[in-house]
């Protein structure tokens, strides 16, 4: 578990530093005064000053921060609030955008490294009555060959493709027991009966084989772009499914993510890079949510000011809102962490 925690902290610090580096570079390029760029959180262990900015190394190793010129100082001419709206939005968006760009590099690197790939026949064990699969003519014993012309090599492939196509007409090629091939059409459901799933099939894998595989750079790059776009869609679909009550939104805190990190690390460098890429995308998306204390909440205040024709909410009021939001966020993290620890102590595992 110690190794898992160390790996998790290293990944988390790296992802948050990339996030903060986005804000830092955008602020510097826009003429906003950055008084401190910190790795970790205080108390301070070491610092050095270059120009107007102090660069610090701090004791609590869970990320980093930028300290901009005080918003409450009337004599400060280079504070963020004094810049045009487009500049302020650019600085605030820069952090999440960096977290959404980084996965391109991580995925590309992961695909180019030799890694294990599960190859198997995906077989239908059971079809729920009146489900999309049943109405399409899929039967017990059929093999799922492809979905929308994409080969299905394992259960993970099929699950991802279905989640990408919720509510859309989907073409599935099946191989029947008599070896005949047939392409059927169905629409995976957004909301489904309990224990059925979007299509209504129960599946298993046979003739499972593990092969070593890697992609050349010229294929890894576009594949990385494709996986990033698919991850955005999966994230959006997960939020929509949770909002309509189809699927519960599972929250995992630092302890749970550290546990997952340890399990993924056992599979090698390539899966660990993929996991870091998915985590980076989540950090980017979450920070864009219009919630206090997050970048999205600060962006919302800038947009609100624009809608009020430049009439700004007082810095103290905005700071109070963000402080309350931060306190609630910390409370949520503590609650989720408690749940993660309870699950681990009772022998639970976060991986399927």
Image (cartoon, helix red, strand yellow):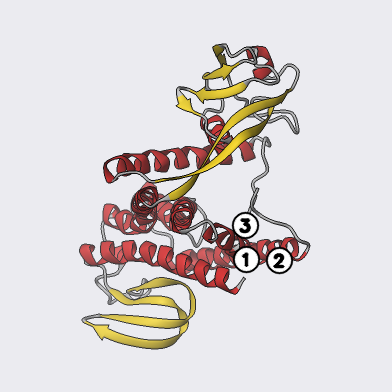
Residue visible at 52% across and 33% down?
A: 153
- The circle on residue 255 is 1
Q: Residues within 10 Å of mark 3 (few under 14, many from 20)?
A: some
**Location of residue 113 in the rendering, given as x and y in whole percent from the top left corner:** 38, 52
Q: Is residue 129 above or below residue 103?
A: above
In this rendering, would 113 be left or right of 339?
left
Q: Are marks 2 and 3 in contact (CB under 8 Å)?
A: no
- Which residue is disc 2 drawn over? 341
**Location of residue 195 in the rendering, given as x and y in whole percent from the top left corner:** 75, 33
Residue visible at 67% across and 30% down?
A: 203
Badge 2 or badge 3: first in the primary sequence? 3
Q: Is residue 62 above or below residue 46?
A: above
Disc 3 on helix, strand or loop? Answer: loop
Q: Are marks 1 and 2 in contact (CB under 8 Å)?
A: yes
**Location of residue 145 in the rendering, given as x and y in whole percent from the top left corner:** 53, 23
Query: Could you give the CA–CA distance between mark 2 and mark 3, rounded to whole angstroms?
Result: 11 Å
- Which residue is disc 3 drawn over? 252
In this rendering, would 240 be left or right of 23?
right
């Amino acid at each position: 578990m110690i190794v898992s925690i160390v790996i998790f902290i290293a990944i988390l610090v790296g992802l948050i530093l990339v996030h903060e580096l986005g804000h830092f570079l955008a602020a510097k390029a826009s003429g906003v005064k950055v008084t401190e760029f910190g790795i970790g959180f205080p108390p301070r262990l070491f610092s050095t000053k270059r120009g107007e900015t102090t660069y610090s190394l701090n004791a609590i190793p869970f990320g980093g921060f930028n300290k901009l010129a005080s918003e409450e100082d009337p004599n400060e001419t280079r504070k963020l609030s004094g810049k045009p709206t487009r500049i302020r939005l650019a600085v605030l968006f820069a952090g999440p955008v960096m977290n959404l760009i980084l996965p391109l590099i991580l995925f590309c690197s992961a695909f180019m490294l030799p890694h294990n790939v599960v190859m198997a026949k995906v077989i239908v064990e059971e079809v729920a009555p009146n489900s999309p699969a049943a109405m399409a003519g899929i039967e017990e014993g059929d093999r799922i060959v492809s979905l929308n012309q994409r080969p299905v090599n394992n259960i993970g492939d099929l699950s991802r493709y279905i989640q990408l196509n919720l509510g859309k007409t989907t073409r599935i090629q099946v191989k029947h027991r008599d070896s005949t091939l047939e392409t059927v059409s169905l629409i995976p459901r957004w909301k489904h009966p309990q224990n059925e799933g979007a299509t209504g099939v129960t599946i298993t894998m046979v003739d499972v084989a593990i092969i070593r595989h890697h992609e050349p750079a010229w294929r890894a790059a576009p594949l990385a772009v494709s996986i990033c776009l698919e991850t955005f869609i999966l994230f959006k679909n997960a939020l929509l499914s949770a909002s309509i009550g189809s699927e519960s939104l599972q929250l995992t805190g630092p302890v749970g993510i550290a546990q997952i990190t340890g399990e993924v690390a056992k599979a090698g460098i390539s899966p660990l890079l993929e996991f870091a890429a998915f985590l980076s995308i989540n950090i980017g998306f979450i920070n864009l949510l219009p919630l206090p204390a997050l970048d999205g909440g600060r962006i919302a205040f800038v947009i609100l000011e624009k809608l009020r024709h430049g009439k700004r909410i007082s810095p103290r009021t905005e700071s109070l809102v963000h402080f309350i939001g931060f306190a609630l966020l910390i409370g949520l993290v503590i609650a989720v962490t408690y749940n993660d620890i309870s699950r681990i102590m009772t022998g639970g595992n976060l991986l399927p």
